[in-house]
Image (cartoon, grey):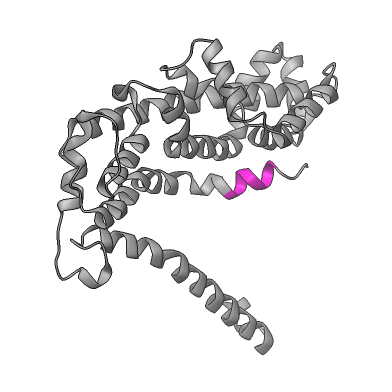
Amino acid sequence: MSIIKNQTVGSRIFDVFNYTIMGLIAVVMVFPLFFVVIGSFSISGMIGGFNAFSLDAYKYIFTTNSLARSTINSVFITVVGTFINIVMTSITAYALSKKYLAGRNVMMTIIVIFMLFNPGMIPNYLVVSKLHMTNSFLSLWLPGAISAYNMIIMKNFFQGLPDSIEESAKIDGCHDLQVFLKIVLPISKASLATITLFYAVGHWNSYFNAMMYINDIDKWPIQVWLRQIIVLSVGGFAGNESLAEFAKVPSDAVKYAVICVSTLPIIVVYPFLQKYFAKGVLLGSVKG
């Protein structure tokens, strides 16, 4: 309170200006979500038609066993995929953070090159097909097991840790794996939480890889099913008779309901990781 009282007039004006701008930005970002939620409960899918309150869009989405099965698939894909990502990324980042690693610069150069120049969809599909991973969840996990961007963030974070911590652990008899598991990982919770959020959101929102690699509709994640519902709601053709139950969905309202259903899990989880998010990104991008 004493600091606020001692502020100059110019400083107070600057604070008011900042609060005003941030408030306007918050309104601009929240309004589309508000619009989507209102539209999902409207029979017409528009705010102007909210006087005709309806739950038809959610009934179409939730009155099918396919949605429950696809939700379980998405949770399974997200949990297992994120675990694989974190294990592979953290191990690779820790190894590459050591300056004494032979060939470290060459490996980093290769990683950066492939981060900037993606081989493309067709080579990726040929690799997955030749490895017989099509129609399997492995096709959603292994090709993207390590994100070069996330790995570099973790690598920079590990490089910023004091060398004295690892040296003292090795003096006490720990080998490299014990140092990594018992010393480095416990003090890297902020960075791990940040990378975990990145990977989990990516797995949950991904649908294109599942469309391309998964032919069995019983293995489809929720995003593919929701997309299929939208396609049918606007008169599209799904090519499968088992999806005919969605053929008369009110399109606009369903589009908004699909957005709400697909984003709700991330909105629920994000507040629990928010305190680690900014800290993890900052520590992963600044050495020392």
Q: State left or right for residue 77 relative to residue 59.
A: right
Q: Is residue 165 magenta?
A: no
Q: Residue at x 20, y 41 (%)?
A: 246
The number of callouts visible is: 0
Image quarter for residue 110?
top right
Q: Which stretch appears magenta?
A: 278-284
Q: Residue at x 33, y 23 (%)?
A: 219
Image quarter for residue 42?
bottom left
Q: Residue at x 20, y 29 (%)?
A: 242
Query: Is 246 situated above or below 213?
Result: below
Q: Residue at x 71, y 10 (%)?
A: 173
Q: Residue furthest bottom?
A: 9
Q: State left or right for residue 168 relative to residue 25.
A: right
Observer able to see residue 277:
yes
**Depth order, front residue of 222/90:** 222
Residue 171: x %, y % from top left: 76, 15
Query: Is 271 situated above or below 13?
Result: above
**Depth order, front residue of 122/255:** 122
Residue 14: x %, y % from top left: 64, 81
Observer able to see residue 6:
no
Query: Is 115 situated above or below 273?
Result: above
Q: Quadrant of the N terminus?
A: bottom right
Q: State left or right for residue 251 relative to residue 21.
A: left
Residue 211: x %, y % from top left: 42, 30
Q: Quadrant of the C terminus?
A: top right
Query: Is 54 situated above or below 96?
Result: below
What main secondary structure does the magenta stretch of the protein show? helix
Residue 213: x %, y % from top left: 45, 23
